[in-house]
Amino acid sequence: MTRITLENANSIIAAAFSKGNALGLKPLSVSVLDAGGHMIAFQRQDGASTLRPQIATAKASGALALGVSSRKIGEMAAERPTFVTSLGTIAPHGVVPAAGGVIVVGADGGPIGAVGVTGDLSDNDEICALAGIAAAGLTAQG
């Protein structure tokens, strides 16, 4: 597969929400972007707070921009805080250095998009992003 379709994106979102519900998490928001960082789909569960669309999108777009998961960006922030802080002014959709932003790769290992999840603890957000990607039959970057 060379791109994430709207059908894939909706499957990712539905599965991420299902995983969150199964784990008893707080209301989630999920953003699915194409390889160029353009939004394919976004949904938020009832009760999700108002800044969640921007956070979910920033997790996904930051991952695409740097070529690593938002969890790894968080690790980078601990090692190089000035560098990661500076990204906020140049990244069009922001960068959130916390787990929950995962790159989706195609058969050749190249990025075809990214998923950003927010709403609960970052580790739980990432679990839901990975569950959504897997349920859609796609592959998360290793």
Image (tube, rainbow, N blue to C red):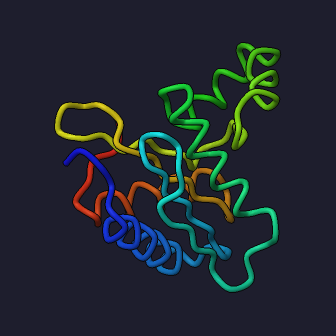
Image coordinates for residue 34, horizontal then vertical, percent: 43, 48
- Seen at 52% across and 73% down, the residue is 20
In this rendered view, identify the residue nearer to me: 134 or 23. Answer: 134
Residue 128 to residue 47: above or below? above
Q: Residue furthest bottom?
A: 46
- Seen at 49% across and 52% down, the residue is 33
- Seen at 62% across and 29% down, the residue is 73
Residue 75 to residue 70: above or below? above
- Seen at 19% across and 31% down, the residue is 108
- Residue 50 relative to residue 125: left or right: right
Image coordinates for residue 96, horizontal then vertical, percent: 70, 40
Image coordinates for residue 58, horizontal then vertical, percent: 66, 46
In this rendered view, identify the residue nearer to me: 48 or 62. Answer: 62
Disc tally is: 0
- Residue 23 relative to residue 105: left or right: right
Determine the image quadrant of residue 74.
Answer: top right
- Residue 89 relative to residue 56: left or right: right
- Residue 64 relative to residue 58: left or right: left
Image coordinates for residue 142, horizontal then vertical, percent: 34, 34
In this rendered view, identify the residue nearer to me: 78 or 117. Answer: 117
